[in-house]
Image (cartoon, grey):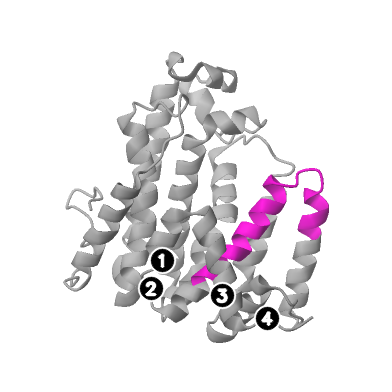
């Protein structure tokens, strides 16, 4: 088999992003080419792990183990002749990548094979780290010239915000698949029972539970996006766009009164473009921390 050219490898990764996440693609397509390509390679890794669990449930355990074994060989210097691995090899050679978040991502997807309910908020927070906070940590050495503990903390918080957004948006779909990510301790606190999920807004306990988790996610968005001034100028707009576009899902769900049951909450392409353009227009004038945050802590575009 002929070796795959690096440019073709990165192009293949880019196509994966374009196919699966227009939001992610919009946010990071404005990066300089080397950073942009590196982000595509990391996304392709994460997408592959996620698809092994979601699209091949009958063989997920076996395929996930094979993928992890392949990653271990990759770290030891053996690179399969596949576009995703070839691109990732180049990323690891260019940037000080930490393998741990990649391993933790695999662990999080493996957890999805065995754990379908969460007893406590702490358990859920750890899961959010494994499947979402890890992505922020993977991207940090690509987007930033120097990674600090504060930046790591904020990246994990932004990942949690985005995963809680996912959980709220997909609560009915997940329930139909036998999964309930709403932690039992919070459901007990608000008098909510998972069997009420099919009732939608007819359950009076849903509204306060939804409001609590929304407020929690909002605080994470504020904390995560406050990392903005720690990044070099060429990365700031992408970081902010990724968080703000995803946060818009939460805004739309709130506008619908918490109705995430009757239709899937979506953010229009027009709104995504408006967020990105607003950030790009601000990019040359960014001088002070939190310039995309209002004084009261609310996020604006």
Q: Secondary structure at mark 3?
A: helix
- In magenta segment, residue 177: no
Q: Secondary structure at mark 4?
A: loop
Name which of mark 2 and mark 3 comes first in the sequence. 3
Judge by depth and name the residue closer to the eye, 121 or 256: 256
Cα separation between marks 1 and 2:
6 Å
Kindly check if marks 1 and 2 are in contact, taking CB atoms under 8 A apart as contact: yes
Judge by depth and name the residue closer to the eye, 262 or 136: 262
Spot occupied by residue 1 in the image (x, y as percentages of width and height) = 79, 80
Q: Which mark is residue 28?
A: 1
Name the residue carrying label 3.
10
Relative to 122, is 283 above or below? Answer: below
Name the residue carrying label 4.
4
Q: Secondary structure at mark 1?
A: helix
Predominant SS along the magenta part: helix
Is disc 2 surrounded by few (<14), some (14 to 19) or many (20+) residues within 10 Å? some
Q: Which mark is residue 31?
A: 2
Name which of mark 4 and mark 2 comes first in the sequence. 4
Name which of mark 1 and mark 4 comes first in the sequence. 4
Judge by depth and name the residue closer to the eye, 65 or 298: 65
């Amino acid at each position: 088999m002929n070796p795959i050219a690096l440019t073709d490898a990165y192009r293949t990764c880019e196509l994966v992003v374009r196919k699966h996440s227009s939001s992610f693609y919009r946010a990071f397509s404005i990066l300089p080419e080397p950073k942009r390509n590196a982000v595509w390679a990391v996304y392709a890794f994460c997408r592959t792990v996620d698809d092994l669990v979601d699209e091949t449930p009958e063989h997920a355990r076996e395929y996930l183990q094979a993928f992890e074994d392949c990653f271990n060989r990759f770290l030891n210097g053996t690179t399969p002749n596949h576009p995703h691995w070839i691109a990732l090899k180049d990323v690891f050679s260019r940037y000080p990548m930490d393998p741990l978040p990649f391993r933790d991502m695999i662990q999080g997807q493996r957890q999805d094979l065995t754990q379908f309910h969460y007893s406590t908020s702490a358990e859920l927070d750890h899961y959010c780290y494994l499947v979402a906070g890890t992505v922020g940590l993977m991207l940090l050495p690509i987007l930033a010239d120097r990674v600090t503990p504060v930046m790591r903390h904020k990246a994990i918080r932004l990942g949690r915000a985005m995963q809680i957004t996912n959980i709220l948006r997909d609560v009915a779909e997940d329930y139909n698949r036998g999964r309930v990510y709403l932690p039992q301790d919070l459901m007990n606190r608000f008098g909510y029972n998972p069997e009420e999920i099919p009732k939608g807004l007819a359950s009076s306990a849903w509204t306060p539970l939804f409001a609590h988790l929304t407020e929690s996610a909002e605080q994470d968005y504020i904390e995560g996006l406050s990392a903005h001034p720690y990044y070099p100028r060429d990365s700031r707009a992408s970081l902010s766009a990724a968080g703000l576009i995803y946060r818009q899902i939460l805004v739309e769900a709130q506008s619908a009164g918490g109705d995430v049951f009757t239709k899937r909450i979506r953010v229009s392409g027009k709104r995504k473009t408006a967020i990105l353009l607003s950030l790009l227009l601000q990019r040359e004038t960014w001088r002070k921390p939190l310039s995309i945050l209002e004084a009261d802590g609310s996020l604006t575009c």
